[in-house]
Amino acid sequence: MIGFLARLGRQGIDRVASLGRFGQMLFAALLAKPEPLVMLPLLIKQLYFVGVLSLVIILVSGLFIGMVLGLQGYTILVDYGSEQAVGQMVALSLVRELAPVVTALLFAGRAGSALTAEIGLMKATEQLSSLEMIGVDPLRRIIAPRFWAGFISLPILSAIFAMVGILGGALVSVEWLGIFEGSFWANMQNAVDFREDVLNGLIKALVFGVVVTWVAVFQGYDCVPTSEGISQATTRTVVYSSLAVLGLDFVLTAVMFGDL
Amino acid sequence: MRTRWIEVLVGMFMMLGAVAVLGLALNVSGLNLSQGDDTYTVYARFENIGGLTERAKVTLSGVQIGEVGAITIDTERMMAVAALNIYAEYNFLSADSSAQILTAGLLGEQYIGIGVGFEEDVLKNGDYIQDTQSALVLEDLIGQFLFNKVSE
Amino acid sequence: MSVIQNDDAIVEIRDLCFSRGRRAIFKGISMRIPRGKVTAIMGPSGTGKTTLLKLIGGQLKPDSGSVLVEREDVNRVSRSRLFEIRENMGMLFQSGALFTDMSVFENVAFPIRVHTSLPDDMVRDIVLMKLNAVGLRGAHELMPSELSGGMARRVALARAISLDPDLVMYDEPFAGQDPIAMGVLVKLIRSINEALGHTSIIVSHDIQETLGIADYIFIIADGYVVAEGDVESLRANQSEQVQQFMKGLPDGPVPFHFDKAELVTELGIERGGQ
C-alpha cells in the first residue's frame, strides 16, 4: 500500500516535472532571438496545415450551428412576440460562446490530434533526436512554428465561424421565416458591443488556441515513442484540451461577462 | 511551386479572417468608425438618472444622434451630470433644447431623448442643457399615486 | 586487458551511472575513446548501447558521473553550447531517421543549410559529393519513403558526414540489413573513416562485421564494461563472459547467446526465491 502510494506520488512528481521542463524549454524556444528568414516559411507551412485545412469543417459547422440557432431562437421567441430579437440572440450566443468554444473543440479534434500524431511519429522515428544531433533545437524548428500557427489560427477560425454562423442564422430567419431584414440586423447591432462581445470572444479564442496547441504539442513531444503510445497521446490531446477549453470557458466567461 | 501555392492559400486564409473580424465589427456590433471620434460634448444635470448607463443612446425624434459618455456627480448641487457625446453632423441643436431620460418599451433600456427648442443660438462643446427631466422611477410613481388616492 | 596509453581521447566517460525508471542501465562505467580510430561498443541487446550514444550526445542526462567530449562536459555546458558541440558530431540512427517531409537531397543538405551560409550551388556540390560517397548520387530526387532500408541508412550516413564532423556515431548500422547491404555499409564506414580521418563509434551486436573494422572494442554487459582492447587481445582474453561472447563468432551474424544464459540464471534465482 505504501509502495503504491509512493509510486503514485513519484509518478505525479515526474509528470509535473516534465510539464515544467517542457514549459521552460518552450518559452526559451519561443522567446529566443527570432530568425524570420528561417522561421517564416516554417510558420506559413504550419498555418496551412493547421489553419487552411481546418477551414472546411469550420465553415460547414459554423453555417449549420448558425442555422439551428436561428430556427430554435425563432420558435422560442415567437411565443413572446419578440421574434425580431432572433438576430441578437444568434449573434450574442455565437460571438460570446459558441464560436470560440466550438471552434476550439473542432480544432482540438482536427488539428490538435494531427499535431500530436505528427510530433509523436517524429519522435518514434528518431527524427527529433536526429535534429538534436545535427545541432538544431527541435523545439525551435518543430515545436515553435506549430505552436505559433495554432495561436494565430484559432482566433481567425473563430471569427470566421461566428461570421458564417450569423449569416446562416440570417438565412434561416430572414429568408425562410420571414423576419424583417432591417430589424434583424438593427436589433443585433444594438445588442452586440464590439469591445464587450466581439473582442472578448476573440480573446477567448486566443486563450483556447494557446491551450489546445500547447496540450497537443506537449502530448506529442512527451509521448511514449511507440505506435500504442502515439495513439494514446492523440486521444489524450483531444480529451485534455476539450476539458481544458470547457473549464477555461467558464472561468473566462465569469471574468468577462459576470459582474465579479 | 507547391510552396508558392501554400503561401497564397495562407494569405487568403488571413484575409478571410480579417474580413470576418471586420464583418463582426461593422455589421454585427454596429461599430461605426467614422463617427467614433468626431463628436462634441454637451452636459445635462439630472435629479435622478435611474438606470441610464454609459454608451446609452442619445436620440432626437427617435434618431440616434450620439451616445452618453461619462456620468458623474456635481458635488455643489448634488446632482448627476451626464456627458452627451453628440455626433458632429448634428450641430444645429438650439441652446434651449431639453433632455429627457426615456425608457425603450415598458422594461427596456433607458436612453436620452432631446427635445428641440426655439432659440437661434445652438449648443456648443461644453454647454449645459438647462431643461432636463429625470428618469421615471417606478417607486416614486406608485408613491405619488397612493398619496393622491389618500388625499382624494 | 590492455588500457589505452594514448592520452588523446576525443570522448571520455567517467564513472557513469544511468537508470531508466527503476532499472539501472549503467552502474558506473568509464571509457576513453581514442581519436581517429574506429571504436566499437558491443554487448547484447538491452544493455543500453544506444543509450550510451545518447549520453555522449548530451540527449540524456546521467544520474552521476560525467561525459566529456573534447574535454567539455556535455551535461555542464549551456544548451546553446551543447548544440555547438553537436555540430561536430554526426550520428547515424538505427532507423535512419531521415526527415520524411524532405527529399534525399534536402535531407543531406539540411545540416549544411542550417549551420553554414554557403551559396546554393556550393551546397549542391557538397551534397552530391556526399551522396556519391555512399553511392546514391542518382537517388537525390527521391523521397525517403521511396528508399529501401539499406539505401535509407546510406542516405542517413551521407547526412551524418555532410558537415565533416570529428566524431561519427553509428547506432546498430548493420541491424536488419541483407548481407550485401551489410557488406556495403562495412566498407563505407571503414573507407569514410580513413578518407575523412574522423573518429567513429560503432554500437552493434553484429560481431563479425564489427570486429572486421574496429580498431578498439569495449564489451558492455550488466551495466559494466566487462572487457576492452583491440581484437587480438580480446580473442586472447580468458574471462568467461568474453569467451562466451567470442564463441558466438563462428556462428556468424546471429546474435550471441549471452542473453539466454542471463535469463536462465535470473529465472533460477526467482524460483529459488519463491
Image: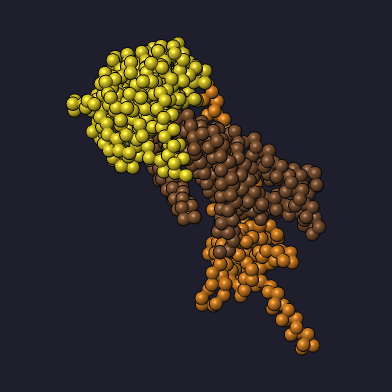
Chain colours: A brown, B orange, C yellow
Q: Is residue C131 above or below residue B71?
A: above
Outermost residue on the bottom side: it is B151
The reply, left or right, for residue A193 in relation to residue C185 is: right
Q: Is B20 or A209 nearer to us in this picture?
A: A209
Residue C117 visible to the viewer? no
Which of the two residues, C226 or A128, is positioned nearer the viewer here? Answer: C226
Name the one closer to the observer, C110 or C28.
C28
Residue plotted at (43% across, 29% down): C260
Q: Where is residue C75 in the image (x, y as percent from the top left)?
A: 31, 39
Q: In which quarter of the image is residue C124?
A: top left
Query: Quick one: C123 or C31, which is closer to the camera?
Result: C31
Residue located farthest toward the front when viewing the structure as drawn: C272
| Quadrant of the rendering where the C terminus of chain B is positioned | bottom right
Q: Is residue A237 depicted above or below C169 in this figure? A: below
- The answer, for residue C28, to whether it is visible in the render is yes
**Where in the figure is residue A59, as x and y percent of width and height?**
66, 38
Name the residue at 33% across, 18% down: C211
Q: Position of residue C217 (x, y in %)?
A: 30, 24
Report the number of numbered marks.
0
Residue C231 is situated, as x and y percent measured from the top left of the image, at: 28, 19
Question: Is A62 left, or right, of C258 in this rendering?
Answer: right
- Seen in the picture, residue B116 relative to A179 is either above or below; the reply is below
Residue at horizontal 51 percent and vertical 34 percent from the top: A226
Quadrant of the rendered structure where residue C78 is? Answer: top left
The residue depicted at 78 percent of the width and 55 percent of the height is: A76
